[in-house]
Image: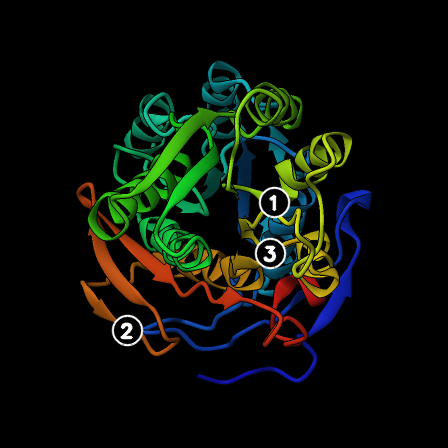
Amino acid sequence: MKIHSRATRAFTGLAVASISVIALGGCASGGTGGTGDGGGEKTTVGFSTAVLDNPFTSGLVQSVVDQANEQGLNMLPPINAEGDAGKQVEDFQTLITQGVKGIVLIPRDSDAIVPAVQAANAAGIPVVTVDTAANGGDVYMQVRADNVSMGTSVCEQIGGLLNGEGTVLEVAGYQATSNGLDRSTGFNDCIKDKFPNIKVITQDAEWNTEKSAEIAQANLSTQKVDAVYLASDTTYLDAVASVMKGLDIWHPVGDAGHVPVVTIDGGAGSLDAIRDGYVDAVVSQPVDQYGVWGTQYLLDALAGKTYKIGPTDHDSEIVDYMGTLADMLPSPVVTKDNVDDDTLWGNF
């Protein structure tokens, strides 16, 4: 696998994020590393995203767009479903009508998007998902982190911090998405198995900042909560921290009033909160790698490459996920010990 020296760069796409993108010229199991244009006219591809309202998603989208254009594809401007699953199905039809040759997808609803994927299949248009999976249709590759494992990592951190006893408020991700459901499943299954004396209060905030604040206010103001689990720090952390400050339970590690907080995503704000002692641990997503491999797999789909289950040459594992292949990229746990690691996307 070859790394191009020009490929690491900062970007400020969509005015809300700055991500470093690493363009990789090889691919596990037979990647092309090609340009997507065969030396002639560029291949036009599309992008359908669930939302563009937070630094994580906007940075992820920009990383894919930058990679696609750098690799010689003509990526149309991403279509934003604005959190509306029905609109996203219509967005797919728009892309099909425009004659794109491939589509990158971040589903709003993993089940509701299936007819759209099937419509693309019928039109002979390959689909690659990034971050969130589709629960049906013929997806060429689902590029994502192992979200069940991420939830398990949060459980292990919180279980240790609470010495196996107490009450946890889980501000969960949208349960209609693969990521929200998997993060909650991994967390709760681990709690039941390893920490049976921990009680979990699970509330679905639907990847919505305002809902996360409402959940935090309703639960933290009415009962004793010993730790908080946020399924998305880029969406929930600022709002929940504001509520905790108002309730005087936002204190750094070492203070008597400290309530442990563990999150998933690894945005810049959460890493700063680890440095300041307010957040105990974060499970960081591989945002730059979503861009690299989402683009590479789209190129491979266009080139007719095939993959099979097994390890890759980029420290991940291709698995069967609901009947399709999924490249499960690693997601490290971040604490004060490694928060300054410059490979973490929140530090780019």
Q: Nearer the viewer, residue 110 or 190?
A: 190
Is the Cβ of the residue at disc 3 closer than 8 Å to that at disc 1?
Answer: yes
Q: Quadrant of the N terminus?
A: bottom left
**SS for tag 1?**
helix
Can you tell which quarter of the image residue 22 is in? bottom right
Is the Cβ of the residue at disc 3 closer than 8 Å to that at disc 2?
Answer: no
N-term-proximal mark, 3 vs 2: 2
> Where is residue 214 drawn, in percent x and y?
62, 19
Which residue type carries mark 3?
Answer: Gly
Please give the label number shown on residue 4.
none
Q: Which residue is mark 1?
A: 233
Q: Residue at x 58, y 62 (%)?
A: 288
Q: Comparing marks 2 and 1, which lies closer to the viewer?
A: 1
**Res 76 seen here:** no
> Where is residue 235 drawn, in percent x and y?
63, 37
Q: Quadrant of the C terminus?
A: bottom right
**SS for tag 2?**
loop
> Where is residue 50 drawn, in percent x and y?
54, 30
226 up-or-down from 285: above or below? above
Q: Residue at x 60, y 56 (%)?
A: 266
What is the spatial separation of the Cα atoms under label 2 and label 1, in whole angstroms?
34 Å
Q: Nearer the viewer, residue 92 or 13?
A: 13
Label 2 environment density (alpha carbons within 10 Å; few <14, some 14–19, many ≥20): some
Please give the label number shown on residue 29.
2
Q: Which residue is mark 3?
A: 266
Q: Residue furthest top?
A: 86
Which residue type carries mark 2?
Answer: Ser
Q: Comparing marks 3 and 2, which lies closer to the viewer?
A: 3
> Where is residue 86 drawn, in percent x and y?
47, 14
What is the spatial separation of the Cα atoms under label 3 and label 2, in whole angstroms?
29 Å
